[in-house]
């Protein structure tokens, strides 16, 4: 596969990844988060990331096989020599954008999890201050007279 084709393939997969990341962000901003939808997005993201890694490995192999140095400098030179410098630059831009979107989604998820944990802690705290004993009778409340004699 040619370098230009590999770069184009990576760009298409990055576009799909950014679309998934956008969907994930939209799901995380809803008041009532759809856990099943989030799980589906996570699985699709994982599959795309595996494919992106596979294609990136192929791109590096082509770069190496053609005699270019490893790393970004060699990749830039290979893209320039193959006449696909614009595709390489576009791929870098999309990669950076996808990374930022993924980081934002991670932060949003972290905030959501902290909020959920705080709510669970609050509910647990309230449950510990129950007004009823295990036998169903209410316990005497401080400051009130227990008239059940």
Image: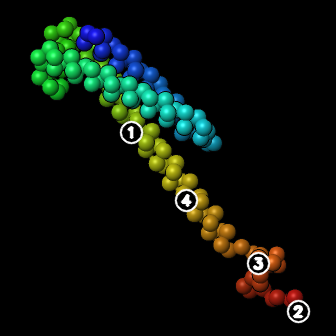
Residue identified by numbered label 4: 118
Residue occupied by mark 1 = 103
Q: Secondary structure at mark 1?
A: helix
Label 1 to label 2: alpha-carbon separation? 63 Å
Q: Check disc 2: other Cα within 10 Å, few if <14, some if 14-19, many if 20+.
A: few
**Element class at badge 4:** helix
Query: Residue 79 at what x, y percent from top left?
Result: 20, 14
- Quadrant that contains the N terminus: top left
Which of pointers 3 and 1 indicates the residue nearer the eye?
Answer: 3
Circle nearer the N terminus (4, 2): 4
Local packing at callout 3 (Cα closer than 10 Å; few below 14, some 14-19, many 20+) is few
Q: Earlier in the sequence, mark 3 or mark 2?
A: 3
Q: Is residue 103 above or below residue 5?
A: below
Residue 89 in view: no
**Residue to which mark 2 is pinned:** 149
Residue 133 — which label?
3
Of callouts 4 and 1, the N-terminal one: 1
Horizontal placement of 16 versus 135: left or right?
Answer: left
Which numbered disc flags the more N-terminal residue, 4 or 3? 4
Which residue is located at x 16 percent, y 20 percent? 64
Rendering coords of residue 29 (x, y %)? 55, 39
Task: Assign a secondary structure to mark 2.
Answer: loop
Q: Residue at x 40, y 20 (%)?
A: 13
Q: Foreground mark, 3 or 2?
A: 3
């Amino acid at each position: 596969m040619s370098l230009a084709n590999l770069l184009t393939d990576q760009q298409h997969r990055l576009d799909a990844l950014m679309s998934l990341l956008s969907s994930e962000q939209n799901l995380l901003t809803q008041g009532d988060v759809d856990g099943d939808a989030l799980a589906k997005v996570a699985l699709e993201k994982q599959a795309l990331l595996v494919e992106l890694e596979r294609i990136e490995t192929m791109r590096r192999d082509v770069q190496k096989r053609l005699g270019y140095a490893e790393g970004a400098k060699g990749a830039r030179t290979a893209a320039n020599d193959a006449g696909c410098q614009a595709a390489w630059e576009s791929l870098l831009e999309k990669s950076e954008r996808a990374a930022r979107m993924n980081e934002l989604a991670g932060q949003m998820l972290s905030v959501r999890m902290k909020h959920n944990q705080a709510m669970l802690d609050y509910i647990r705290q309230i449950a510990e201050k129950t007004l009823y004993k295990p036998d169903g009778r209410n316990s005497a409340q401080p400051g009130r007279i227990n008239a059940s004699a």
